[in-house]
Image (cartoon, rainbow, N blue to C red):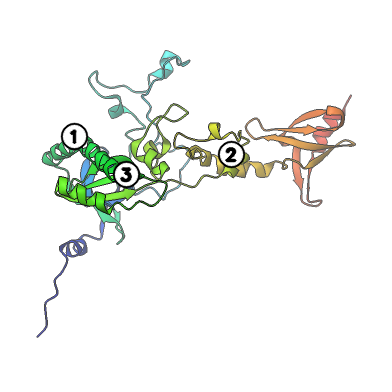
Amino acid sequence: MKRDRVRNPAVQERRQRPNNGFIYLVKNPASNEVSICAWDSVLYPGTSVVIPTRYGLDLGVIISSADRLDRSYEPGSTQFRGACHHQRWEDSDLDDEEEVLYQGEADEHPCESCRGCNPSIDPQEVPIASDVFWIDRLATPSDLNRYQELLAKEDEAMRICREKIALHKLDMKLVTAHYLLGEAKIIFFFTADVRVDFRELVKDLVSVFKIRIELRQIGVRDESRVLGGLAVCGRDFCCHSVTDKLSPVSIKMAKEQNLSLNSMKISGPCGRLLCCLSYEYDFYVEEKRSYPPEGSRLKVGFDLLRVTEVNILSKQITLAGGEGRMLSLPQSAVFYNDATARWEVTKQWTDEFLSP
């Protein structure tokens, strides 16, 4: 006699999903993480949904359609998601005509008519890969009300957890607490320099809250990503508002961009190197291939001068010679000679420079 196998309802439901659907970028407001999820109909930015996260079922907000993520940008195309166009800066030097970047009703929020916030892109139905998670359901008014109720209880949970941490004398810093929307569970995020044994702490917290407790240790960069704040540029942290991917940043990136190596100037509030150092690094590496490297020598007339500085923004090369002589020439005046395997100055520029 064969024994019937007990099937997991979640797995069975996943097998019944259609092969095609719409994929979206969905942001979790609690952890500030962005994931790709699928749904069987068209959704628009700002729609609240309940999604599976690595912590459990939780609230998510649709950011945009994700079916065009792997497509390259076509010059002149207006169908892309860009920066918010309606924002005005104080003490702006722009004319009044240039500051009017949207037109809408008097009681309408500027973002509703903003070309950057709402690009004219219709989601397209695409084949759904097996590793793409499906949105569990659209958030109902009761889900949103419960989310606000749980949000209000998080401060009290933080206070209780801090008291328990002090009671057990644990060397850890509590960052934030979060109630999951789809499950009876509280997640406490903390930072610590060393490994912390929090088993007794979990027991105390379970006795107080009577639900599942999960403690997760995160790094200082993750702390900034979760909490957010203002960076040295005056805008929100990139890891909090632009992307949730913490790409590695090295001091080599600062050197390649000729930035000051003062740690106070190239470090963020988290104490680590600025995430934005990696944004233009590839551009600098690509552009510097059209310039002679610093320290190399160029022959100008009968003199051999050394390259002291390469400025790719002004497209100028600074040369130094004997007796404190300095010379600046444009990037168009140099070229790499494949025959001699060295950088040289064009004859046209040399003749113009040495002409009386």
Query: Marks 2 and 1: which is nearer the front?
Result: 1
Secondary element type, mark 3:
loop
- Hey, what amino acid is under mark 1? Ala
Query: Marks 2 and 3: which is nearer the front?
Result: 3
Cα gap from disc 1 to disc 3, whole angstroms = 27 Å
- Which quadrant is the N terminus positioned in? bottom left
The front one of 8 and 30 is 30
- Hey, what amino acid is under mark 2? Ala
The answer to which of marks 1 and 3 sits earlier in the sequence is: 1
Residue drawn at x 40%, y 36% is: 78
Q: For mark 1, what is the residue?
A: 152
- Hey, what amino acid is under mark 3? Lys
The answer to which of marks 2 and 1 sits earlier in the sequence is: 1
Dividing the picture into quadrants, the one containing residue 296 is top right
Residue drawn at x 49%, y 47% is: 248
Secondary element type, mark 2:
helix
Q: Position of residue 138 (x, y in %)?
A: 17, 45
| Residue 29 shows in this picture | no
The front one of 104 and 55 is 55
Left/right placement of residue 194 relative to residue 313 reads left
Residue drawn at x 41%, y 19% is: 89
